[in-house]
Image: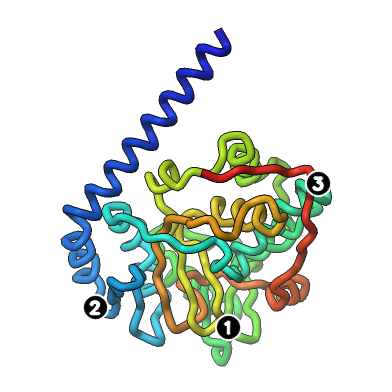
Amino acid sequence: MIQTAKRLLLRFALIAKLNQFLKYYYKVLITDQAEIRGLLNKCPFLTYDSDTNVFRVNKKELSLMEKASIRSLFKKRVRKISPASIKLKDIRSTHYYDRCLEHYIYERLIEHKRNDETCWRCHAQSYRCIGWHDPLEPFETEDKREYVKKRAAEVKIPGWGVTDLGSLVRDDDGNVFRLTSKVTEGDEGVLGLVEKIKKQHYSNWLSIASPMILGYSTTTDRYNAISGRHRLAAIKFLQRQGVMSGELDIMCHVVEYPFESLTFTRPYSDKCKQCMENDNCYDNPNEEIQIFCS
């Protein structure tokens, strides 16, 4: 009975991979060019390099609304376009939030820390960057109230954050954070993803059903997950552990821009800032984790 179930699961997995394979090449041969033109028509400062298969933002300064619109546009439209590929080893460094999630995996699986002891829960989730406010302008209670109303209109969530103005702080660069002392205890889903990849291997053909979308900053040389943060953290963690080849081609979309990030996640605590400056917060191979890639 168990063997029959395993054979059926294997058969379904092969069918799913074949289905994605056929969809991919249909897009490449038939629909890609029209979909790319349609996406570019939605954004006047976006271009596409057909030689490298990379989207590029050609405007040096964007408002938060413009950044949000690009992220939304890609999440809605890019699934209709066949993804390109990038060597895992070429994703050399990742942005703050992505790296912190990767470090969370290390703290849980290698250092065996409790969730409430991890940097991800104590820092990244407790100090959430929610936007920017001119650091030269006052930021008292009424200023915060007006700021929250403006951000609520931008993100289209009525009443967004209004009841907890005291939790809002602004750093010297103008980044606004919402602080909380609540630390959840349950595991992040990314740990299950690592376990799944260990058991079932990493498959691009299954992943492209909802392809990763990576932003790349030409000013910091760092990648940032616009979509697929858990996958990015999992495969980078496994690569750093020396158990997943850096030569693996990762199928994804890449959008390049001449500024730090399309998101406004920023480190708040000194500990997070120090980790952000260090590209090798941890780098200890672990022999207990084994993975094979397909």
Mark 3 Cα-neighbour bin, 10 Å: few <14, some 14–19, many ≥20: few
Q: Identify which residue is drawn at 72% across, 51% down.
A: 183
Tell me the kind of residue under disc 2. Pro
Q: Identify which residue is drawn at 49% across, 54% down.
A: 228
Query: Can residue 153 be spotted in the picture?
Result: no
Tell me the kind of residue under disc 1. Gly
**Which residue matches tag 1?**
174
Q: Identify which residue is drawn at 66% across, 72% down.
A: 267
Q: Which mark is residue 114?
A: 3
| Residue at disc 1, secondary structure | loop
**Which residue matches tag 2?**
44
Q: Which mark is residue 20?
A: none
Instruction: Locate residue 245, reporting x and y percent.
Output: 61, 55
Q: Depth-wise, is mark 1 or mark 3 nearer the camera?
A: 3
| Residue at disc 2, secondary structure | loop
Mark 3 or mark 2: which comes first in sequence? 2
* Distance of label 1 from label 3 (alpha carbons): 33 Å
Q: Depth-wise, is mark 2 or mark 1 nearer the camera?
A: 2
Residue 241 shown left or right of residue 40 in the figure: right
Tell me the kind of residue under disc 3. Arg
* Distance of label 2 from label 1 (alpha carbons): 28 Å
- Quick check: 124 above or below 206? below
Q: Identify which residue is drawn at 72% across, 55% down.
A: 241
Quick check: marks 1 and 3 in contact, CB under 8 Å? no
Instruction: Locate residue 220, reporting x and y percent.
Output: 56, 81
Q: Nearer the viewer, residue 271 or 8?
A: 8
